[in-house]
Image (cartoon, rainbow, N blue to C red):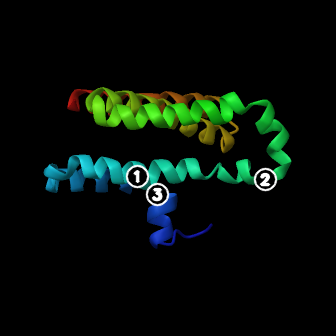
């Protein structure tokens, strides 16, 4: 059995639950910097997460697929970026609520999908699915009432 090495990789990659706690502590200690914290979090976490797909666009092998699906793969993301930027500055609270809801949906589905990859037992998969949905719903309700 492998022993867990308590190093930076463990805490930042294998145990990323520290990020929400760190976010909460910073928000609690420095509430006057809420907007700046949101922008930094989006730039550091959200954009780098999206950046993982950039090599797909650069590889020449994918050019025919990109050309055929440029509306869905290029046009819509650019429109989303434009509306998100405008929404953040014009209707901040509504934008953050929509962004939060979309992220909760994305993270919930992603967490369940990763769980399914490592679980062969159907009963355990169902338990994990229910647990993931309950926990994410609780966090969504907490975030919703924060507004």
The residue under the point 65% across, 51% down is 54
Front residue (pair 109, 102): 102
Q: Which mark is first along the chain, 3 or 2? A: 3
Judged from the image, the secondary structure of the residue bearing numbered disc 3 is loop
C-alpha gap between disc 2 and disc 3: 32 Å
Q: Name the mark on residue 85.
A: none
Front residue (pair 140, 47): 47
Judged from the image, the secondary structure of the residue bearing numbered disc 1 is loop
| Residue bearing the label numbered 2 | 59
C-alpha gap between disc 1 and disc 2: 33 Å
The residue under the point 15% across, 49% down is 31
| Residue bearing the label numbered 1 | 17
Indicate whether 2 appears above or below 31: below
Q: Name the mark on residue 15.
A: 3
- Where on the picture, by quarter, is residue 11? bottom left
Indicate whether 5 appears above or below 68: below
Mark closer to the observer (1, 2): 2
The residue under the point 43% across, 56% down is 44
Mark 2 Cα shell of 10 Å, populated few (<14), some (14-19), many (≥20)? few
Front residue (pair 47, 141): 47
Mark closer to the observer (2, 3): 2
C-alpha gap between disc 3 and disc 1: 6 Å
Percent x, y of residue 75: 62, 32
Percent x, y of residue 14: 51, 59
The residue under the point 81% across, 43% down is 63
Mark 1 Cα shell of 10 Å, populated few (<14), some (14-19), many (≥20)? few
Percent x, y of residue 120: 70, 38
* Callouts 3 and 1 close, C-beta under 8 Å: yes
Q: Is residue 53 visible?
A: yes
Q: Is residue 108 visible?
A: no
Indicate whether 13 appears above or below 71: below
Percent x, y of residue 72: 67, 29
């Amino acid at each position: 059995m492998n022993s867990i090495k308590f190093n930076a990789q463990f805490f930042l990659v294998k145990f990323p639950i520290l990020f929400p706690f760190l976010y909460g502590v910073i928000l609690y200690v420095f509430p006057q910097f809420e907007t700046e914290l949101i922008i930094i979090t989006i730039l550091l976490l959200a954009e780098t997460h999206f950046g993982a797909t950039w090599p797909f666009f650069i590889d020449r092998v994918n050019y025919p697929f990109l050309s055929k699906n440029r509306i869905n793969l290029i046009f819509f993301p650019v429109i989303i970026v434009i509306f998100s930027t405008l929404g953040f500055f014009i209707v901040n609270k509504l934008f953050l609520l929509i962004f939060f809801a979309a992220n909760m949906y994305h993270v919930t589905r992603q967490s369940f999908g990763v769980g399914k990859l490592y679980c062969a037992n159907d009963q355990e998969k169902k338990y994990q699915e229910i647990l993931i949905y309950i926990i994410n719903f609780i966090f969504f309700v907490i975030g919703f009432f924060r507004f």
